[in-house]
């Protein structure tokens, strides 16, 4: 079963790890899955696929996709600039990229809502030209963009940093124009990491709650994301309804985890 | 790093290159400013909108202080537990070969992938009044959901991978020759860990603890599901912010939020310092791997 | 302490790393395990150390099963190719480690530790560097620290895994000589793993040549050099010219050569190959009937010796001759020279 190693502690550390993981993660996961089917499969599907639930999935998927795409574009630029250029305050900018990780999501949520509300610093000028952000799907997308940014930047940054500038110079010396160098030399090298970052940001957005709940407005069928619907069902003591949606979201998480693992091993093979 | 920055100065010296470079830098900074700096500034601006005194009153309100106490208590339980787990997991995974190892590593990563709200739902399915073991525990007077244990369990769940995730790649990269050597020189298991392993992973460990702590203090979704928002009893600081905000007490909400924001800025500073300092010292925790 | 390996076998999945190896190392001897990478020499060394366990077979220390003893109590000093120094400890603390981790009852006093470390530091010529961190040392210095650390616990057996493999050629040369001196001084039973034949031949009392998990030959450096037991040893140690062909009816037909081979009188032909080292060939201007004519292609003067590359048919012949002989002949590329073999070793069997 295990390759014999001379180092001690195999039983102890593996025992702690397996027990801990089982108690903290596996037990609750199985409890929820077990609970979700206790009311029968038809009840499960009725709750998981109700019109209101379907609307929330559609909204969650669309907003997450748009947010991840925005991050893919701007995250690439930020990562490129941070990895390649030297400018004043670079260290500060670099540290700030992690703020969405470090800032509690509830704080981010109320801050974004205040900024984008019709009376806010950004919301007011936008309202003047007829764009409403807070309490609309746009607001949800803004919040999801905020929390997804570090995933793209932090996945791309080391890859761009490790790109050999010599290769670009070689391309340039062979007569390639800068954009040709980018498309033919740089892009192929960073695409796996780019997709990984995009997928990570997308996966995070699918399950995000804290930063969205304040700015979303939470109107059923219109601005109600899936995690919020779980919360609403719970507050209505509709446990089976909440569990059904949660199990579906859990399934989506597994799929995303598989996708990320696949992308990362592809990425690792590429850079090897 | 050093010589690549020298190479960089050689590159893109043409005028067109310079324009691209300035345009890209400006775009990146503008994006960061709009999406990251502005929300942060907004928190402090709102917090101090009615002066320092109002801010002081909001953060020293008994309910706020109770929330701070609960948050600190939760962190004091969750972070050390996950720290011990992270070390044990990293040791088991990087020092031995066994069947199911890849599966175990994936399970360790799982909490990062699951929505906080779903985490809360899981705990309710298990420990809630309609849960699998909840009624039995309630009968023995042990309440988990809508009580402190639920808050701690939710926090432990969402912060579980942080330390392990920092240690595993580092210990993998270090290899185990030093430890084998210590073993041959007669050191026992605890001596090997204390004298050989721990000194070489201490920076990554600290890094992981900082990240886990930041997440533990700020966790909202999962805690929100299981806490029941009982003011002064199960309200953590982020939940207290929500309560105040929902009561339209914006200034107080932002005042309490500003403490969390300061903590976040402090976390970023500590994180940058640790990764800078440990790079100076030759150890290198994975930079920015929070995922 | 003497070491005896009995029928050691070790597999990793489908790969047989060590295949039924038996071996004896006498007390105070320095034995080199020599072979290409993948030959199983490092695996064998790690099994002797107890770092890996054999699937089959036994390791005996002084006739006693080593597996019965705890790893830390085996009395094995191990030196890793990449040093494995404790990176956060000073040179001094690295060397003192083995003494500091002993149980309190048998731990030397601080003073004894200090004395022992300083005498070891002077033994490895590193006294001024006691307070440095490993990262502040050169590769050669690090390996000397690793050796001192292994010696600090007074091992009964010293095992060295490619100790100079990661070092520059000139440092390697110097450390090699120093290691031999050290061994003569301390006389601790030692096993050295190396892929460098020069290193093995120069340092060891006996050489064990390994290939694909098996022992090809065990012998003194002279025996291994002058009487290679197998074609593998022949070609692994030093350069060699090969003539392929067959043996039948008491004769060997090897490329352009035909020599008597009474060991195989039968009519059934067997594949065979003849091996001759470059310095075992003579070149002359005039032919006779026991050699072959070949054309000079390239001439390399290397100090006291001269290497000639000659072509015969499609085959390249390497000849090593003295400077004097070269000066007497003065060959130029394109010249025809007559090559005579002073000896030829014939091995029968497909290689």
Image (cartoon, rainbow, N blue to C red):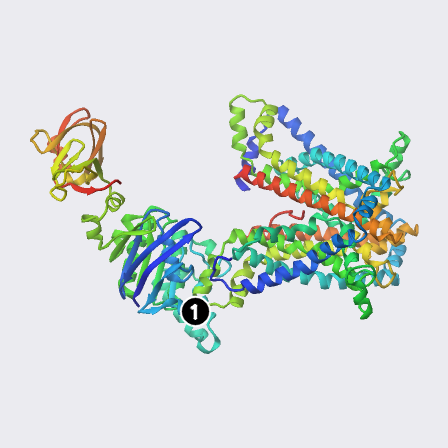
The residue beneath circle 1 is C70
**Spot occupied by residue C285 in the image (x, y as percentages of width and height):** 10, 29
What is the crowding at mark 1: few (fewer than 14 residues within 10 Å), some, or many (at least 20)? Answer: some
**Residue C259 horizontal side relative to residue A224, left or right:** left
Query: Which quadrant would residue A114 be assigned to in this image?
Result: top right
The relative height of residue A177 versus residue C57 in the rendered view (above or below) is above
**Spot occupied by residue B283 in the image (x, y as percentages of width and height):** 55, 53
**Residue C181 horizontal side relative to residue A133, left or right:** left
Dot 1: chain letter: C
Q: Nearer the viewer, residue B281 or C35?
A: C35
**Spot occupied by residue B98 in the image (x, y as percentages of width and height):** 53, 56
Q: Identify which residue is drawn at 88% across, 39% down.
A: A221
Q: Nearer the viewer, residue C47 or A172?
A: C47
Q: Nearer the viewer, residue C312 or C59?
A: C59
Residue B42 showing in the rendered view: no
The relative height of residue A146 versus residue C336 in the rendered view (above or below) is below
Residue C312 showing in the rendered view: yes
**Residue C1 horizontal side relative to residue B54, left or right:** left
Helix, strand or loop under label 1: loop
Query: Which quadrant would residue A66 be assigned to in this image?
Result: top right
Q: Nearer the viewer, residue B122 or C326?
A: B122
Query: Which quadrant would residue C299 be assigned to in this image?
Result: top left
């Amino acid at each position: 079963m295990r390759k014999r190693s001379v180092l001690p502690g195999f039983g102890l550390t593996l025992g702690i790890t397996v027990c801990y993981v089982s108690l903290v993660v596996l037990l609750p996961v199985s409890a929820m899955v077990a609970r979700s089917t206790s009311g029968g499969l038809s009840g499960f599907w009725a709750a998981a696929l109700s019109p209101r639930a379907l609307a929330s999935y559609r909204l969650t998927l669309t907003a997450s996709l748009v947010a991840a795409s925005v991050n893919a574009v701007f995250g690439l630029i930020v990562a490129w600039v941070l990895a390649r250029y030297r400018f004043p305050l670079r260290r500060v900018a670099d540290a700030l990229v992690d703020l969405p990780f470090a800032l509690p999501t509830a704080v981010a949520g109320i801050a974004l809502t205040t900024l984008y509300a019709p009376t806010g610093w950004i919301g007011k000028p936008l309202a003047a030209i007829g764009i409403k952000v807070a309490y609309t799907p746009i607001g949800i997308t803004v919040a999801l963009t905020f929390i997804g940014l570090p995933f793209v930047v932090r996945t791309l940054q080391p890859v761009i940093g490790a790109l050999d500038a010599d290769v670009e110079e070689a391309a340039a010396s062979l007569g390639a124009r800068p954009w040709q160098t980018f498309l033919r030399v740089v892009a192929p090298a960073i695409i796996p990491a780019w997709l990984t970052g995009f997928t990570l940001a997308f996966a995070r957005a699918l399950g995000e709650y804290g930063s969205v709940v304040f700015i979303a407005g939470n109107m059923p069928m219109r601005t109600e994301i899936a995690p919020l619907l779980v919360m609403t069902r719970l507050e209505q003591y509709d446990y089976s309804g909440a569990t059904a949606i949660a199990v579906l979201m859990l399934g989506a998480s597994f799929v995303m985890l598989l996708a990320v693992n696949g992308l990362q091993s592809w990425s690792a093979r590429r850079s090897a | 790093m050093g010589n690549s920055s020298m190479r960089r100065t050689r590159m893109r010296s043409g005028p067109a290159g310079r324009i691209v470079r300035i345009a890209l830098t400006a775009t990146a900074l503008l994006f960061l400013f709009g999406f990251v700096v502005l929300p942060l500034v907004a928190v402090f601006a709102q917090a101090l909108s009615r002066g320092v005194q109002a801010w002081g009153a909001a953060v020293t309100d008994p309910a706020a202080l109770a929330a701070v106490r609960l948050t600190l208590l939760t962190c004091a339980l969750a972070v050390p537990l996950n720290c011990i787990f992270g070390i044990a997991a990293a040791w088991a995974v990087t020092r031995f070969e066994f069947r199911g190892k890849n599966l175990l590593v994936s399970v360790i990563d799982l909490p990062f992938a699951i929505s906080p709200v779903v985490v809360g739902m899981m705990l309710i399915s298990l420990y809630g009044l309609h849960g699998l073991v909840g009624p039995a525990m309630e009968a023995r007077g042990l309440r988990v959901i809508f009580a402190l244990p639920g808050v701690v369990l939710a926090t432990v769940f969402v912060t579980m991978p942080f330390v392990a995730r920092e240690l595993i790649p580092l210990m993998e990269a270090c290899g185990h020759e030093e430890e084998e050597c210590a073993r041959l020189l007669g050191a026992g298991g605890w001596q090997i860990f204390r004298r050989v392993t721990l000194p070489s992973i201490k920076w990554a460990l600290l890094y992981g603890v900082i990240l886990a702590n930041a997440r533990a203090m700020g966790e909202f979704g999962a805690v929100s599901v299981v806490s029941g928002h009982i003011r002064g009893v199960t309200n953590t600081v982020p939940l207290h912010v929500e309560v105040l905000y929902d009561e339209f007490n914006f200034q107080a909400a932002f005042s309490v939020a500003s403490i969390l924001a300061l903590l976040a800025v402090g976390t970023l500073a500590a994180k940058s310092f640790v990764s800078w300092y440990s790079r100076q010292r030759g150890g290198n925790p994975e930079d920015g791997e929070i995922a | 302490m003497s070491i005896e390996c009995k029928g050691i076998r070790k597999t990793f999945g489908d790969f047989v790393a060590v295949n039924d190896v038996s071996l004896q190392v006498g007390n105070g001897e320095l034995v080199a395990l020599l072979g290409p990478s993948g030959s199983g020499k490092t695996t064998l060394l790690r099994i002797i150390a107890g770092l890996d366990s054999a699937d089959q077979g036994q390791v005996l220390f002084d006739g006693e099963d080593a597996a019965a003893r705890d790893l830390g109590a085996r009395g094995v000093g191990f030196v890793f190719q990449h040093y494995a120094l404790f990176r956060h400890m000073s040179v001094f603390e690295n060397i003192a480690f083995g003494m500091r981790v002993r149980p309190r009852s048998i731990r030397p006093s601080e003073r004894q530790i200090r004395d022992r470390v300083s005498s070891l530091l002077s033994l490895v010529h590193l006294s001024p560097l006691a307070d440095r961190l490993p990262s502040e040392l050169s590769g050669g210095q690090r390996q000397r620290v690793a050796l001192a650390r292994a010696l600090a616990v007074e091992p009964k057996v010293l095992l060295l895994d490619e100790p100079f493999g990661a070092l520059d050629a000139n440092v390697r040369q110097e450390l090699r000589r120093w290691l031999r001196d050290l061994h003569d001084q301390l006389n601790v039973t030692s096993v050295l793993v190396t892929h460098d034949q020069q290193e093995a031949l120069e340092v060891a009392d006996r050489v064990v040549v390994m290939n694909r998990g098996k022992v090809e030959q065990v012998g003194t450096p002279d025996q291994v050099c002058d009487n290679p037991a197998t074609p593998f040893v022949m070609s692994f140690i030093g350069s060699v010219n090969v003539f392929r062909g067959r043996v039948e009816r008491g004769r060997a037909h090897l490329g352009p050569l035909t020599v008597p081979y009474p060991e195989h009188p039968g009519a059934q032909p067997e594949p065979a190959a003849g091996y001759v080292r470059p310095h075992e060939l003579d070149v002359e201007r005039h032919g006779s009937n026991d050699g072959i004519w070949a054309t000079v292609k390239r001439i390399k003067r290397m100090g006291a010796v001269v290497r000639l590359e000659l072509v015969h048919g499609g085959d390249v012949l390497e000849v090593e001759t003295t400077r004097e002989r070269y000066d007497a002949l003065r060959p130029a590329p394109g010249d025809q020279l007559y090559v005579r073999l002073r000896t030829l070793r014939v091995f029968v069997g497909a290689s």
